[in-house]
Image (spheres, helix red, strand yellow):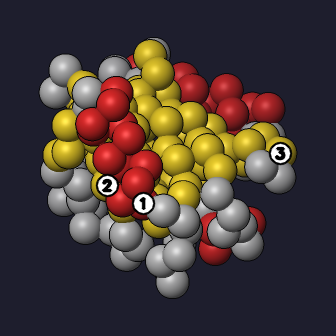
Amino acid sequence: MHLDHATIVTPDLDAVRRFFVDIVGLSDGARPPFRFDGAWLYADGRAVIHLVDSTSPAGSPNDAVHGRVSPRIDHVAFRVDSHDAWHALIARMDAAGVAYQRAEVPLTQQVQLFVALATDVVIEFVTAAQNASS
């Protein structure tokens, strides 16, 4: 397992995007067609920063659950690279009674699990859809 990305929710999407592109050296890249505005910024061919516009009506997937729209770092995501590791993770969460929400990323063949550890702390686990199949 390794850190996959960080999501930053901001009311000034363009200024934050420019900072990460112009100052940090990340590059704009492809982003799935979510129901809310945002940008994915890449380093070494991977989307490492996900930006979400906090002024978008739909907000991020977690806003509907938690009613949050203020600027924040929304969540930290860990990539799970194998079928066995993915199912072992789910088994451990199920055994411990850890609640999670499952989602599929549009057009990407990826599956996500979101775990709310506290009111303002969300952890995401993401894997290829083939790893998530039974």
Q: Quadrant of residue 71?
A: bottom right
> Going from the N terminus, do you reach mark 2 or mark 1 first?
1
Residue at point 43%, 49% (across, down): 16
Separation (CA) of disc 3 from disc 1: 26 Å
- Which residue corresponds to mark 3? 118
Q: Are marks 2 and 3 in contact (CB under 8 Å)?
A: no
The residue lying toward the viewer, choosing from 18 and 1, is: 18
> Going from the N terminus, do you reach mark 3 or mark 1 first?
1
- Which residue corresponds to mark 1? 13
Looking at the rendered image, the disc whose residue lies closer to the viewer, 2 or 3, is 2
Q: Is residue 42 found left or right of 19 in the rendered image?
A: left
The residue lying toward the viewer, choosing from 119 and 96, is: 119
The residue lying toward the viewer, choosing from 14 and 55, is: 14
Residue at point 50%, 44% (across, down): 7
Q: Is residue 107 found left or right of 95 in the rendered image?
A: left
Disc 3 residue crowd, few under 14, some 14–19, many 20+, Cα 10 Å: few
Q: Secondary structure at mark 2?
A: strand
Please say whether residue 27 is visible from this viewpoint: yes
Q: Is residue 23 shown above or below 12?
A: above
The C terminus, quarter of image: top left
Q: Are marks 2 and 1 in contact (CB under 8 Å)?
A: yes
**Residue type, label 1:** Leu
Q: Is residue 109 shown above or below 5?
A: below
Name the disc covering residue 39, or none: 2
Where residue 75 appears, as percent x and y from the top left, is 59, 42
Q: Is residue 112 found left or right of 101 in the rendered image?
A: left
Q: Quadrant of residue 28?
A: top left
Disc 2 residue crowd, few under 14, some 14–19, many 20+, Cα 10 Å: many
